[in-house]
Image: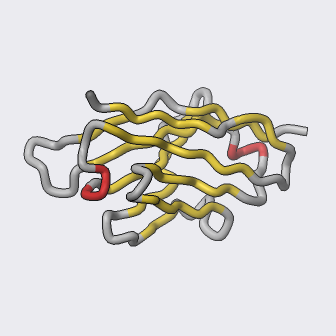
Amino acid sequence: QVQVVESGGGLVQPGGSLRVSCAASGFSFNIYTMKWYRQAPGKQRELVAIITREGNTNYADSVKGRFAISRDNTKNTVYLQMTSLQPEDTAVYLCNALHPWAVPIRTYWGQGTQVTVSS
């Protein structure tokens, strides 16, 4: 049974830091490209960060230099370390797993974890 479970969200003050985690099971985690998205109320879902199975990373311009994605294949977990958080970072953060070459597309989503940046 496939499971993708985010954790670590919460309330943080502007300028603060937070790390969210995504624990996966039921599929070959080490093969999959892992992504973090976020969705704020009334806004479109935004791709925040990507990490490939080789460990290559890419970031949205809005978070570049502040956020860092990493993965631990021994724990089937991907992380998003967020620093210098601002109110505009407030959103539900969602984890996505994407098989890099499967046809049809094989992808899994978590339920999300709420991050609120407010004083």
Above or below, 72 relative to 29: below
Residue 75: where, in percent of width, then height? Answer: 44, 52
Choose top left, top right, bottom left or bottom right for residue 24: top left
Where is the C terminus found, in terms of image quarters? top right
Choose top left, top right, bottom left or bottom right for residue 93: top right
Give the camera-side residue of 3 and 45.
3
The residue depicted at 58 percent of the width and 28 percent of the height is 42
Above or below, 72 relative to 37: below
Give the camera-side residue of 90 and 29.
29
The residue depicted at 27 percent of the width and 37 percent of the height is 26
Give the camera-side residue of 6 and 35.
6
The residue depicted at 28 percent of the width and 54 percent of the height is 32
The residue depicted at 81 percent of the width and 42 percent of the height is 12
Left or right: residue 5 compared with residue 21: left
Residue 34: where, in percent of width, then height? Answer: 38, 53
Colour mapping: secondary structure
Above or below, 113 relative to 95: above
Where is the N terminus found, in terms of image quarters? top left
Residue 112: where, in percent of width, then height? Answer: 52, 32
Above or below, 52 relative to 26: below
Q: Which residue is farthest front?
A: 74
Q: Which residue is farthest left?
A: 103
